[in-house]
Amino acid sequence: MMDILKITKEDAKEIFKKYSYRFDGDYDFVGIRVQEQPFELGKIEHASKVWDDGEETDEELDGICVIDANDYNEPSYFGYHIAVICGDEAEHGNDRGELIISDPVVVEILK
């Protein structure tokens, strides 16, 4: 049975404040990611894939997809593992509140 990500908008704002350079942190972009595989602290070497009509393709994006902690809308994503991922280079993804961080670093494992 998979857990449901339940992080409130207030939780996300606290995470953003903790890691964003605009407050006490060191990063330009702060995101939350849910995935099936466990996380390890540090730099992420793999990239997210392009999805087409709900199907994953072999095409890689220029980074890893996260939910923007600064534009968080309390989504419900399924997965076993949840982490805070930060970086200094990113672009907006196709989904509302989605970022693609091109220099991703896992800075905190939430679950």
Image (spheres, helix red, strand yellow):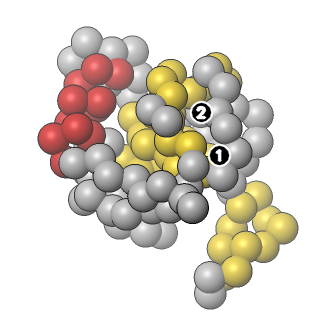
- Return the mark for residue 104: 2
In the rendered image, residue 101, in percent from the top left (x then y), is placed at 55, 42
Q: Label 1 amino acid?
A: Gly
Depth check, front residue: 81 or 16: 81
Task: Place residue 103 in its image quadrant.
Answer: top right
- Determine which residue is flagged by label 1: 63
Asked whether residue 41 appears in the rendered view, the answer is: yes
Number of marks in the rendered image: 2
Q: CA distance from mark 1 to mark 2?
A: 7 Å
Q: Secondary structure at mark 2?
A: loop
Q: Quadrant of the N terminus?
A: bottom right
Q: Is residue 63 left or right of residue 82?
A: right
Residues under numbered marks 1 and 2 in contact, where contact means CB atoms less than 8 Å apart: yes
Give neighbour class at mark 2: few <14, some 14-19, many 20+ (Cα, 10 Å). Answer: many
Which numbered circle lies on residue 78?
Answer: none
**Which residue shows up at 54% across the image and 59% down it?**
2
Q: Amino acid at mark 2?
A: Pro
Q: Residue at x 56, y 43 (%)?
A: 81
Disc 1 packing (10 Å; few <14; some 14–19; many ≥20): many
Q: Is residue 91 above or below residue 29?
A: below
